[in-house]
Amino acid sequence: MIDYHIHTARCGHASGKMFDYVARACELSLREIGFADHLPLLFKQDPTLTMRIDQLGEYIQAVEDLKKEFPEIAIKAGIEADYLPGYEEETARLLKSYDFDFVIGSVHFIDGWGFDDSRYIDGYKDWDIYKLYTRYFGLVADAAKTGLFDVIGHLDLIKKYNFRPEADITPLVRDTVGAVKDAGACVEINTAGLRKPAGEMYPSADILRLCFESDVPITLGSDAHKPEEVGKDFDLAISAAKDAGYDRVAVFNKRVPQYISLDIF
Ligand SMILES: [Zn+2]
Ligand SMILES: [Zn+2]
């Protein structure tokens, strides 16, 4: 299988050597992995969230070195970029300056509030939860519309701390999935949600079915921030993909997708 969402210690909140992440992937006989560490934020510098801009070249080089060290597995150089309204051009410029295999676009901030960061969890008190979901899914749709991203990261991350609206969010999600489809991007099945208060993958089974019905392709990612998280709960991810109707996943080479069977290991 493949794992297309792996971090490195450069982001300041992941641990272990890149070597150990790859070694774990080999232990699991994964055929392909993609590092996707956090791209530096353009609105602030926070060494606990992302690498510095001057570390980008060295990050790509480290992936290149690992390719030589581990010929038995395909290793791709990806990046997880934040969607930050108002910073689209700067983001585009930064993404163009390196030869990435794929770019995951993620929303981790709402008007500067890091809603998926436990240090700022108090912020949920200021919101009506349905309005918060509306705002979040609107931002994810805007992220897709920029066309900057190959994959939309953890599509329903807003559920991370299990604040759930009472009303049905399907209409919000439908618009967002439509925007992802129009942009020609994929979504990822991200197993990290299973390790968080939400207790389920991103996206939920219902949203994944909506993605399948809208003909949006998928990739798979663990969002590993430790070597032992590589490929974590992928048996569940694969069953979720199949239950939603999928039989293939996307892999990327220099930002061009290719599709492989979910049954190929
Ligand atoms: Zn992270
Ligand atoms: Zn993320």
Image (cartoon, grey):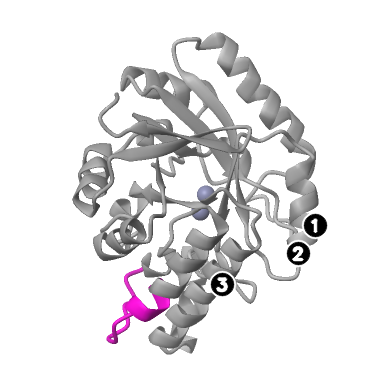
Q: Is residue 114 visible?
A: no
Residue at 51% in and 41% down:
14
Q: Give the quadrant of residue 133.
A: bottom left
Using the image, determine if residue 241 lies above or below residue 122.
above
Looking at the image, tell me whether mark 3 or mark 2 is earlier in sequence order.
2
Label of residue 90 in the image: 1
Q: Quadrant of the N terminus?
A: top left
The residue pinned by badge 3 equals 139
Residue 101 horizontal/vertical position (percent): 61, 34
Q: Nearer the viewer, residue 98 or 120?
A: 98
Separation of disc 3 and disc 2 at Cα? 13 Å
| Label 2 crowd (10 A; few <14 / some 14-19 / many >=20) | some
Name the amino acid, label 2: Tyr
SS at mark 1?
helix
Relative placement, left or right, of 242 versus 251 is: left
Is label 3 in contact with label 1 (beta carbons under 8 Å)? no
Name the amino acid, label 3: Leu
**What is the magenta range?**
161-173
Magenta stretch: helix, strand or loop mostly: loop
Separation of disc 2 and disc 1 at Cα? 5 Å
Looking at the image, tell me whether mark 3 or mark 1 is earlier in sequence order.
1
Residue at 52% in and 71% down:
120
Is label 2 in contact with label 1 (beta carbons under 8 Å)? yes
